[in-house]
Amino acid sequence: MCLCGVTNVNAGNAFNLSRDVPLSVASYYGDHMVLQKAPAAASLWGYSSNIGDVILVKLINTQEIQQEQGIVWMGPEGKGVWSVLLPPNEAGGPYSINISNSFGNMITINDVLFGDVWICSGQSNMQFTLPMAFNSSEEIAESSYYPDIRLFTVAMETAHEPQYDFISVEQPWSVASPRSVGNGNWTYFSAVCWLYGKYLYQKLKYPIGLVASDWGGTAIETWSSPDALERCGISEKPKTSDVPWPTAYSVLWNAMMHPFLNYTIYGVIWYQGEANAGNPLGYNCSFPAMIDDWRVKFSESNPQTSSSFPFGFVQLAANRNDPSISTGYPGIRWSQTTGYGSVPNPRQKNVFMAVAMDLPDYTSPFYSVHPRDKETVASRLALSGLAVAYGKAEKYQGPFPSHVIFSRLNNQLSIIYDMGQANLLIKSQNGFEFCCSLSLAVCDLPSLTSWYAVTTMTSTSTTVTLEVPTSCNNKTVQVVRYAWRESPCPYKQCAVYGSVNELPGPPFQISLI
């Protein structure tokens, strides 16, 4: 539909309009949308073929009319572009927005709320939709009780050059309802994204905008800009054919993330890493580099988005029912924390995570790589987000070692956890092991000169004590590690949890030399 000569057009259908028109808005603006609340100023922009024309934007509610103006200028695509910053508005609504030019063209956007806008991105476990999850019938039915949560889903598209607007949209802004959250398998809406937003809303009590931009099977390199890849010494991969999923580097950054740069957002959550399990060490650079790069590019394009916006992620869940697999996923989990074991950390500031390694689902009809318990994943992620992104006083992390004491004389290692007001909750005796070696042989993989040996443990309210196994006698004990398996334990039965919120301790490895 073209807006040419139209005096009043509802913007709910504006997402698929031609950009060579007298007046239009970018594809992620429309009826029922959420704009970022104060203290940030929400951005609004679109296209116009009338260079130099004045665009008048009115924000209207029952109490007042706020008015801003923008000038149409020649944008980077060779098309006329206009933009305005709306005055900072506190959470709430609804508002209407009238956008007009001097030629009598007008767009009206209705039922607009101000709140916090979160982008949800990654591969298939983020794309995994609510009807596929455990307890989906109840969750879908309850969605109608959350009309202040609004949803938007980007269509899966690729581009070899950065796009300034989306090529297409799968789900325009929609009020939460059984239809909008439960459309079907692999369509919309993302289960983790929806549940994360719902749990935030239950605490914050103001509107939440959830934007899903994800694609199953995709590696982090497809979501990273060339600048981010260059920081890790990654050269551009040849532009191969996209079947059955994109592999060319940066093509999803270009098509499914870059268009958001002019949109004011609050934060991002991310569930990805399975596709990079073959190169965990590389993820140690590419993941934080991507976060840094997104923050820089979002804030440089739109300074109303914080240059340190909160970024949350799901640490990889369990996969195959094989307790012998100790490569791939464990290394990705470690690299997701840049080798610190937990977040936030000095390399990853304002970053939070949910541990999911204790949630295996070996009988999932969507394969074990797609566990169905997204409620636990999202509740853990929301708990962390409320603490890190909102400063709420929450016990949001499972136990993590503060220091270790190694008595080589007694062949014992004590791992001390800083538990605050909580105690250790030990559910299993399994998961700890030592690397023992002849001389200082590398401990990466078992060999004739180095190997990992499981150990027995005892515990107190704050300490786990491990016995060095007899197979390590007269050997160099180099490393202690915990839960270093692709699937380290049965459902919610790893060894170490906290007594408050029963959050699992994340995997770790600690050098002892």
Image: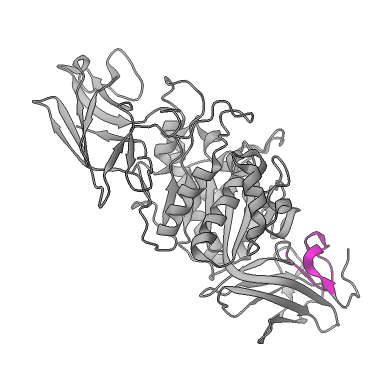
Residue 231 visible? The answer is: no
Residue 239 visible? The answer is: yes
**Is 280 placed above or below 42 here?**
above
Horizontal side, residue 363 vs residue 167: left or right = left
**Is 310 placed above or below 511 here?**
below
The image quadrant that residue 91 belongs to is bottom right
Q: Residue 472: give x, y in percent of width and height.
A: 20, 18
Horizontal side, residue 500 vs residue 256: left or right = left
Q: Residue 336: give x, y in percent of width and height.
A: 43, 42
- The single residue placed furthest to the left in the displayed view is 409
**Which one is in front, 250 or 374?**
374
Q: Residue 459: give x, y in percent of width and height.
A: 22, 34
Q: Quadrant of the C terminus?
A: top left
Tell me the magenta residue range. 9-26
**Which one is in front, 393 or 278?**
393
**Which one is in front, 43 or 355?**
355
Residue 321 on the magenta span? no
The image quadrant that residue 61 belongs to is bottom right
Horizontal side, residue 2 vs residue 222: left or right = right
**Which one is in front, 51 or 466?**
466
**Is 116 placed above or below 284 here?**
below
- The single residue placed furthest to the right in the displayed view is 5
Q: Quadrant of the N terminus?
A: bottom right
Residue 24 on the magenta span? yes
Q: What residue sits 70% from the left and 62% below the top?
A: 28
